Amino acid sequence: MKRIWNEILTVLALCFLLAYSYPAFDENISASQQIVIDFVQWACWLAFAMDLIYGIWKAGNKKDYLRHHPLEIASVLLPFLRPLRLMRVISFGGLALQKIAIGRQFAITVKVALTTVFIAYISAVQITITERAVYGSNIKNFADGLWWAITTVTTVGYGDRYPTTTEGRFLAVLLMVMGISLVGVITASVAAWFVKMSQDDAR
């Protein structure tokens, strides 16, 4: 039963991601479309909130449960992080790669890389929705938002696209912090791989 419920939550996260992303690609959303989008988002939020409340209620040590379920908490408290429920799919994919004899280090690197791309995508969606209609903003469409997200998460920071609102800057800070951590893991893994290759050649 728990497995089925987890699969349902994953499907709901995907539905939320689609509903959440749509406004970034289409500025001219009709009233009926907006009603559908709002309904999907609220229905997904309700399912996530119920799952979190039930998990806390069933947990023997509630503080320990909260400490080990940051994605669940974030998906309920922060609207634009609800698609992070799909991180479970990335985790399962990393475990699958690990079992196919590709190697644990490679599996972790792939998982971190996918996580980085995923976070950059949802950040691009959110920054586009937030900044597009603001006077003086230089992020006017999803392409601009995606370019900003990629240059920010990789800590390149060209400065040709940047947020002008408070919400956008807050999002930028979060993306910078996560970008340093995630890209650092990828860089370290690649460097370790080259070192291992050099050691194998020297033998």
Image: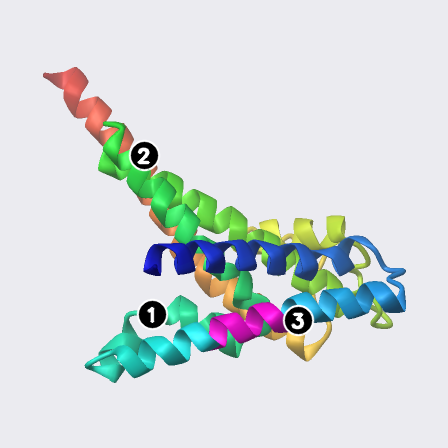
Characterize the magenta stretch by its predominant secondary structure: helix
Q: Earlier in the sequence, mark 2 or mark 1?
A: 1
Q: Looking at the image, can residue 191 be seen?
A: no
Please give left or right for residue 133 compared with residue 155 in the image. Answer: right
Q: Residue at x 41, y 60 (%)?
A: 5
Residue at which label 1 appears? 69
Q: Are marks 1 and 3 in contact (CB under 8 Å)?
A: no
Helix, strand or loop at mark 1:
loop
Q: How many marks?
A: 3
Q: Which residues are magenta?
A: 42-49
Q: Secondary structure at mark 2?
A: helix
Let me know if residue 111 is in the magenta part.
no
CA gap, disc 2 and disc 1: 23 Å
Determine the residue positioned at 44% across, 43% down: 113
Locate the N terminus and report the quarter of the image it occupies: bottom left
Q: Which residue is mark 2?
A: 97
Quarter where residue 190 is shown: top left
Q: Which is nearer the N-term, disc 3 or disc 2?
A: 2
Q: Which residue is mark 3?
A: 168
Neighbor class of circle 2 (other Cα within 10 Å; few <14, some 14-19, many 20+) is some
Residue 41 placement, left or right of 7: right
Towards the viewer: 1 or 58 = 1
Spatial separation of the CA atoms under disc 3 and disc 2? 36 Å
Q: Distance between the Cα atoms at labels 1 and 3? A: 26 Å
Label 2 amino acid?
Leu
Instruction: Please state which of residues 153 and 75 is positioned toward the viewer in this rendering.
Output: 75
- Above or below: residue 153 compared with residue 103: below
